[in-house]
Image (cartoon, rainbow, N blue to C red):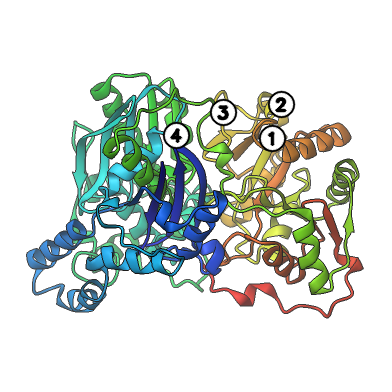
Amino acid sequence: MLTLGLSAFYHDSAAALLDDGVLVAAAQQERFSRKKHDAGFPIDAVAYCLAEVGARPDDLDFVAFYDKPVRKFQRLLATHLATAPGGFETFRRAMPVWIGGKLFQRQLIDGALRDVGATRRLGKRLLFAEHHESHAASAFYPSPFEEAAILTIDGVGEWATTSLGFGSGSTVEIQREMKFPHSLGLLYAAFTAHLGFKVNSGEYKVMGLAPYGEPRYFNQIMDEVVDYRSDGSFRLDMSFFDFLVGSSMTSDRFAMSFGPARHPDDELMQNHLDLAASVQLVTEELVLRIVREAHASVGVPDLCMAGGVALNCVANGRVLREGPFDRIWIQPAAGDAGGAIGAAYLAHHCFARRPRPTPMVPDAMSGSLLGPGFGDDEVERVLTAAGAVFERLDDVELRDRAVDALESGLAVGWFQGRMEFGPRALGARSILADPRSAEMQRSLNLRVKFRESFRPFAPSVLHEEVASWFDLDDDSPYMLLVADVAERRLLGMSAEDMQRTGLDQIYATRSVIPAVTHVDGSARVQIVDRATNPRYHALLEAWHERTGCAVLVNTSFNVCGEPIVATPQDALDCFLGTDIDMLVIENCLLDKTAQTMAPRPDHRHSFDLD
C-alpha cells in the first residue's frame, strides 16, 4: 500500500511516502525550488517521492494532508469576528488568499497531481488530518517506543497550540489541548520579530543569541505576560501582542515594557541579548512544566515530541536532564515539514487500520536520510558539463585527502548519499571543518556562510567517543539536544577572557574544540553511528586516528538565506561562489585552487537573507 503525506500552504511544504507502512522517501519543496521555507504545493517533492519507488500518482492508495483547512478558516473567521472592527485590514488581505484557493484544497491537490501524471481524481483516497494529530503521529510512529506520551508544541494548527497525547501500538490519541491564541510558539515568535529576525525562520538565531545575555526580563515575562496554571497550561496577556488584529506580532505595550523593536540592520545591543536570554529561559521553564504534567497525566516512562518548539534543542537538553521521563525521542523534522510524515502514518494506521510493526531501533527514520541521492557517473556528467576540474578517487584516498584538507584548516563541502529530511545537515549535505581552531567559528560564519558571527556551529562526534567529549548519556543522531562539553575538554580562561561581555564573549577560548563550544560551554551535538551513515562515520574515524579528535564542525551546506543544497549542481554553485576550499561529491573531489572556470559572483547575492 502506497500512502503519500503532504504539508503545504503555510511554510516548509513537504512530501513523504510510505510503502506498506515503511517510510521510504521524504523531502521539502524548498530543496528543489531553491526558495527557503517554500510554502507552495510540494510538486517537486511529490515527483521525487514517487520516482524513488517507481510509482505514478494513480498508484497511490491514499494521499493525506497534514491539517484541516476548513477548521483553520473557521479559526480565522472567529478571531476576526471576536476582535472586529480592529482586525478588518488583516481580514481583508487574508480573504482573497483563502477564497482564491486555500479553502478548495481538494481541487488544488487533484490539479497538482495531474501535473505529475495523474489521470483520475483522488476522491475518497484524499484524507485530511488535524494539524497536531499529524505532529503527534510523526513523533510516535517512527519512534522506538511501543507506547509513549506525546507532546506537540508549535505556533498554532487549526486551533491547538499545544497538545498532550498517548501513543500505543497503532493508535495515537490526543487527550488535552491548549488553544489559540495562547501559544508558546507565538510567544517565542513575538520576541523573534521584536529582535529584528524573521518569524518562522529566525527563531534559532534567538536561541543562539541567548547565552550572550542575562535573563533579566524573565520574572517580568512570567509575572506580566504569562499566566501559568497548575495543570501545565498557561494564558498570554494579549495586550502585549498585535497578531490577533494587526499585521505585526507585538503591541505598543510590548515596546513600552521591553524597549523599541530592533530593525534587522541595527547593531545587537546588550538589551537585545538579555531579551533573547529571557524568552529562551521562559520557554525552557514552560516546556519543563508541560513535560512534568504530561508525565503525571499519562504515566509512562517514554516521551515523543514534535512541533516547531521541539526544534529548540536547548529546551530539549533540559527535558532530557531534568525531566521525569526515562527516554525522549524527537521527530528530526519537528516543524511543519514533518507533518507530511505524520499525515501519511495516520492514513496508514488509523484510517486503513494497518498494524504497526515492532518499533525499530534506533527508529524508523533511516537517519533522516530520505531525500534524493546521486551516483558517481551522474556527478561526473554535471561536473564535466560545468567545466569543473575534479578527480575521481577510491574511498580510502578520498577520505585521506579530505582529512588532509581539514587538518590544514580548510573548509570542506561534503555531499554524500541521500539528502537529509528536516532542517539539520547530518553529514550528507554538510560543510565540515576543524573544531580545534579558535578562529574557525568566525571564519566560517563570515567567509563561507555569510551570516552573523555570533551563530554557533554544531559538532559531529563518533558514537564510540561521545562520552569522552560531551556530557550526554542519550543518543542524539539528529542534532536536537544541547549538552555541555565534557569537563576534561574545558580550558581555564584567561583574565582577559573572563572580563568579556556581550557578543565580545565569542573571542574567548573555552575548550579544546572552541569552534563548536558555545559561550555557555555547551554544544548542539550530533552523534554519528556507523550503521546509519557509514561513509561519514568512516571520515570521522580517519580524522580521529589522524588527530586524536573525534569531533568535526558540521554546518549545513548552504549560505545564509539559501536552502541546503540538493543536487551536485547546487553544491558546485555554492562551492564556486563562497570560500569553501574543497568539495567532495560522492567519489569526486574538487580543489578550489585547481579550478580554471571564470570566478562566480558572490553566492550570498543569489538568496534573500533569512
Q: Is residue 260 above or below residue 524?
A: below
Task: Identify the disc placed on residue 461.
Answer: 1
Judged from the image, the secondary structure of the residue bearing numbered disc 3 is loop
Sequence order check: which comes first, mark 4 or mark 1?
A: 4
Q: Are marks 2 and 1 in contact (CB under 8 Å)?
A: yes
**Residue type at tag 1:** Val
Front label number (3 vs 4):
4
Judged from the image, the secondary structure of the residue bearing numbered disc 4 is loop
523 sits to left or right of 171: right
Q: Residue at x 84, y 69 (%)?
A: 388
Tell me residue 462's x, y (percent): 71, 32
Q: Residue at x 71, y 70 (%)?
A: 573
Please name the residue that numbered disc 2 is placed on: 465
Q: Distance between the Cα atoms at labels 3 and 4?
A: 15 Å
**Residue type at tag 4:** Pro
From this viewpoint, is residue 382 visible? yes
Mark 2 burial class by Cα count in 10 Å: few <14, some 14-19, many 20+: some
Tell me residue 498's x, y (percent): 65, 43
Q: Residue at x 33, y 39 (%)?
A: 136
Judged from the image, the secondary structure of the residue bearing numbered disc 1 is strand
Q: Is residue 251 above or below residue 531?
A: below
Decide which of 483, 214 is in the foreground and name it. 483
Please name the residue that numbered disc 3 is placed on: 475
139 sits to left or right of 410: left
